[in-house]
Image (cartoon, rainbow, N blue to C red):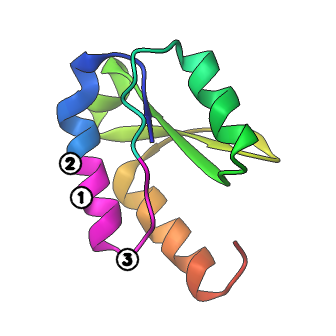
Amino acid sequence: MLTISEKSDVFATEALNTLKAAGLRVTYDDASEKIGAKIRNAQLDKIPYMLVIGEKEAAAQSVAVRHAKRGDLGVKPLADFVSEITGEVKERRL
């Protein structure tokens, strides 16, 4: 999970707890680097999904989803993303 600024930290923490409660492994990068550097680091670490959270996403209770190989997948409500990703984990597609 990557945040754009500290203004979205409250929602990012809520999202982190939601994802962990669903049984997913999640890391949270709240460093003060630019978002491009955070994305590059996540790709180098071979993290399959990156959830980018900014002010707009926090206000809408959603996440901007990026996949390591498929690129930008758009903005999705957090609940929808959780149901999609848990389905992938159960089917071992991830």
In the image, residue 1 lies at what x, y percent?
45, 42
Q: CA distance from mark 2 to mark 1?
A: 5 Å
Amino acid at pointer 2: Glu
For the residues labelled 2 and 1, say whether their Cβ atoms are less than 8 Å apart.
yes
Q: SS for tag 3?
A: loop
For the residues labelled 1 and 3, say whether their Cβ atoms are less than 8 Å apart.
no
Q: In the image, what residue occupies the spot 82% across and 47% down?
A: 69
Q: CA distance from mark 2 to mark 3?
A: 15 Å
Relative to 89, 76 lies left or right: left
Query: Looking at the rendered structure, which numbered label has been put on residue 23?
Result: 3
Relative to 36, 29 lies left or right: left
| Residue behind mark 2 | 14
Residue span colored magenta: 14-27
- Give residue 83's quadrant in the image: bottom left
Within 10 Å of disc 2 (Cα), the crowding (few <14, some 14-19, many 20+) is: few
Q: In the image, what residue occupies the spot 45% across and 66% down?
A: 25
For the residues labelled 2 and 3, say whether their Cβ atoms are less than 8 Å apart.
no
Relative to 63, 6 lies left or right: left
Amino acid at pointer 3: Gly
| Residue behind mark 1 | 17
Within 10 Å of disc 1 (Cα), the crowding (few <14, some 14-19, many 20+) is: some
Q: In the image, what residue occupies the spot 52% across and 12% down?
A: 34
Relative to 10, 30 lies left or right: right
